[in-house]
Image: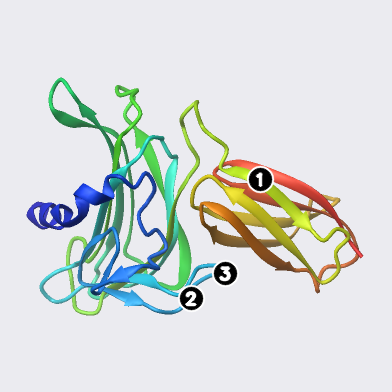
């Protein structure tokens, strides 16, 4: 397996290492049957939307009777995220499992090797027929205080054993949180309009990097009335929230991204 991983990485590592963010994190861009920025085996392009603002395609990894489905990317990074998140579907055959691994490293100029700064993994064997959010928490090496300079993500179905038709669908990868004291807020700007509102509102924001964003509607007693998740891209974004089933009154529109919360009060009239 190590040989397979090394072979796949050589296809794209030289260009992907300039990325600074997860390449093609929503798997919207494909060329010659492969997702741009990724090395893959047993992969095909899924073409159905999976969530609001999720785009039109996703990655499907399928095992055969002789090999697993595999996707790998490696790219430059200069922060210490708390976790890797995303959406997945999983259909196992014969007790197959899947795994998502993220490894952050720092090149050591003295030893000429890369030191492991942090590692996270998420694995399961239970079927997930509906799209489900996963979180792979990242644990950092207490003996390495450096900021990582490289990140590798490995996603594999049929991890220990593999059977025909075991598939793993993946979409909307993103980093969540940041353990660095130099963390930069991901939400650059945020506004909600119209205010007062009637049947719907538009949430407009600008992000410093791609992220999964949650938008909540909360009443004045602090009760959550609505909650929606969106995958938003770096730069300007705007999404609509339906308020046709929300009673008249005062509410708070709360946006959460990368551990940062922004709130704006609105009147539903």
Query: Do labels 1 and 2 touch, CB within 8 Å?
Result: no
Percent x, y of residue 56:
46, 75
Q: Which residue is mark 2?
A: 49
Query: Do labels 2 and 3 touch, CB within 8 Å?
Result: no
**Separation (CA) of disc 2 from disc 3:** 8 Å
Q: Crowdedness of circle 2 by 10 Å Cα count: few (<14), some, many (20+)? A: few
Q: Secondary structure at mark 3?
A: loop
Colour basis? rainbow
Q: Secondary structure at mark 2?
A: loop
Q: Can residue 140 be spotted in the picture? A: yes
Percent x, y of residue 4:
10, 58
Percent x, y of residue 129:
42, 75
| Image quarter of the N terminus | bottom left
Q: Is residue 257 left or right of residue 15?
A: right
Q: Which residue is mark 3?
A: 52
Q: Can residue 152 be spotted in the picture? A: no
Q: Is residue 143 left or right of residue 250?
A: left
* Residue 87 location, quadrant: bottom left
In the image, residue 59 above or below residue 3 = below
| Image quarter of the C terminus | bottom right
Q: Secondary structure at mark 1?
A: strand
Q: Residue at x 81, y 74 (%)?
A: 244
Q: Comparing marks 1 and 2, which lies closer to the viewer? A: 1
Give the number of the disc on residue 10.
none
Percent x, y of residue 89:
40, 70
Q: Which residue is mark 1?
A: 189
């Amino acid at each position: 397996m190590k040989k397979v991983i090394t072979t796949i990485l050589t296809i794209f590592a030289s260009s992907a290492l300039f990325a600074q963010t997860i390449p093609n994190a929503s798997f919207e861009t494909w060329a010659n049957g492969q997702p741009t920025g990724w090395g893959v085996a047993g992969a095909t392009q899924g073409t159905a939307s999976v969530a609001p603002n999720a785009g039109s395609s996703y990655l499907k990894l399928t095992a055969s009777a002789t090999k697993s489905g595999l996707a790998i990317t490696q790219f430059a990074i200069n922060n210490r995220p708390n976790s890797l998140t995303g959406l997945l579907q999983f259909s196992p055959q014969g007790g197959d499992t899947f795994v998502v691994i993220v490894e952050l490293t720092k090149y050591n100029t003295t030893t000429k090797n890369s030191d492991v700064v942090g590692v996270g993994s998420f694995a399961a064997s239970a079927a997930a027929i509906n799209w489900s959010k996963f979180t792979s928490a990242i644990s950092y090496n207490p003996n390495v205080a450096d900021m990582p300079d490289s990140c590798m993500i490995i996603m594999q179905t049929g991890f220990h054993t593999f059977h025909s038709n075991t598939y793993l669908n993946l979409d909307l990868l993103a980093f969540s949180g940041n353990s660095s004291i130099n963390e930069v807020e991901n939400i650059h700007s945020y506004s909600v309009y119209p205010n007062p509102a009637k049947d719907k509102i538009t949430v407009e924001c600008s992000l410093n990097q791609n992220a999964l964003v949650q938008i909540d509607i909360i009443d004045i007693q602090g009760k959550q009335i609505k909650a929606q998740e969106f995958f938003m891209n770096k730069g300007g974004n705007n999404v609509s929230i339906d308020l046709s089933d929300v009673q008249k009154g005062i509410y708070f529109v709360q946006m959460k991204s990368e551990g940062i919360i922004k709130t704006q009060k609105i009147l539903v009239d």
